[in-house]
Amino acid sequence: MRIAGATASAILQELAKMVRPGVTTGEIDQQAAVLMRDHDCRSAFLGYRGFSRYTCISVNEEIVHGMGGTRRIMPGDIVSIDVGVVKNGFIGDNATTVAAGDVPDSIKRLLAVTEQSLFEAISHARAGVRLADLCASVEAYVAPRGFTVVKEFVGHGVGRKLHEEPQVPNFRPSGKSPVLMPGMTLAIEPMVNAGVADMRILADGWTAVTLDGKPSAHFEHTVLVTAGDPEILTWRPREALPEMLGLPPL
Ligand code: MG
């Protein structure tokens, strides 16, 4: 899982560098194919329930599961890239959202709050913690800051399969909740909207977009629960925190 996570992270970081005005989402996805070949791994998404791309690339109002194609990235767009790979039979899954050129402070704040909400959840990925408390920490961080979490899609256990038990929603789930134990590996992935939480699926059958057309951000890590601190298997350098961006404190 460590090797799969490091591989997924390396590929995601390379792809994120490609995000700039003029590039198409299809070009990024094709580069993913090249990088996966170079890293001797394969896409965990290609062929999943018939999905036909190597990665998910979701622009602006697209929340998740965007399909790389002819959409050309424009100045001020935000682009979410989700990379899941299978390496030696194990899966690493991670996502980030980056801006193409300069974006308004409101968008920088959306990105920063979403990424920080991921780290709030990761701080709860400890043995003995109830999963529901980890899940609840995402919405508890996001909602007071004026954003909404998507309810229809959730994080998940990950290992030899892409989607394993348990589900990891970005809000407090109802019912009995398992206690985290060392050795569990979770894909934690807040999806946060600038406007309403509601979404719809485009005619391609995959792309989820915000109902009000406002932007959405997505950050994800594969995290190992240990006897001590959580281990982020898909670690990458963080984007700037809000205060580093010169934004007002959260
Ligand atoms: Mg995932």
Image: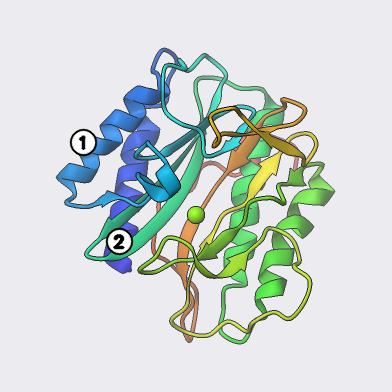
Amino acid found under the numbered disc labelled 2: Ala
Count of numbered badges drawn on the protein: 2
State which quarter of the image contains the N terminus: bottom left
Q: Position of residue 9 (x, y in %)?
A: 35, 51
Query: Which is more toward the observer, 20 or 237?
Result: 20
**Vertical arrangement, residue 11 with respect to residue 166, above or below:** above
Q: Which residue in the structure is indicated by mark 2?
A: 4
Check disc 1 and report the residue beneath it: 34
From the viewer's side, name the closer residue of 47 and 76: 47
Q: In the figure, residue 137 lies in which quadrant?
A: bottom right
Q: Position of residue 192 (x, y in %)?
A: 68, 44
Coloration mode: rainbow
Q: Is residue 224 left or right of residue 174?
A: left
User: Can the viewer see residue 82?
Assistant: yes
Q: Evaluate if marks 2 and 1 touch, with contact meaning CB atoms under 8 Å apart.
A: no
Instruction: State the CA–CA distance, disc 2 to disc 1.
Output: 17 Å
- Residue drawn at (29%, 37%), measured in percent from left and top? 32
